Image (cartoon, rainbow, N blue to C red):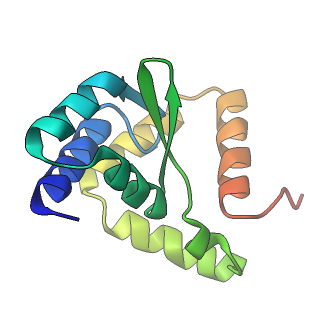
Amino acid sequence: MNEASVALKEMILKNLGQNGFPMKKVSLPLEKLYEVADNKGANLNHILESLAQEGTAHEKSGDKIIFEAVLPESMANGMNQEDMMKQAQEMMGQMSPEQIAEIQNMVANMSSEEREEMMKKAASMFGGGSHS
């Protein structure tokens, strides 16, 4: 990826983070992203491909592009529960105390149904089902 693409990718990730990503799906204007990429000499499709490989999935919907955090396949394949916990701890270790506090706050303010739905999504992301 060229320098312009790397810079645009970082800008997209920063923008997503400011809008609640990875805990929330975030949509950005599709046409605007293509314009910015074109003006900077970057290739948006290559950036989106790179993001997908790193766990940031996207879906183009009309005039928007919707980003969602997913576990990259390379991480999901063949992971046991111990590996998943280790991975989750590593991810948390890369977060700032403010980000962790924000996530804890968000979870604390969720209804029990929302928490249950989040746990189902987490289980499916990590390739496991409910083992109750």
Is residue 17 positioned above or below 87 on the image? above
**72 and 131: which is toward the camera:** 72
Is residue 44 positioned above or below 90 on the image? above
Q: Quadrant of residue 73?
A: bottom right
Q: Is residue 37 left or right of residue 89?
A: left
Q: Residue furthest top?
A: 63
Residue 3, given in percent of the width and then of the height, sits at 11, 61
Q: Can the viewer see residue 100?
A: no
Q: Is residue 75 left or right of residue 39?
A: right
For the N terminus, which image quadrant? bottom left
Determine the residue positioned at 56% across, 61% down: 71
For the C terminus, which image quadrant? bottom right
Is residue 73 positioned above or below 33 on the image? below
Q: Is residue 23 left or right of residue 79?
A: left
Residue 94, given in percent of the width and then of the height, sits at 31, 66
Determine the residue positioned at 84% across, 56% down: 130
Is residue 2 positioned above or below 5 on the image? below
Q: Is residue 87 left or right of residue 40?
A: right
Determine the residue positioned at 32% across, 53% down: 47
Q: Can the viewer see residue 91?
A: yes
Residue 14, given in percent of the width and then of the height, sits at 22, 44
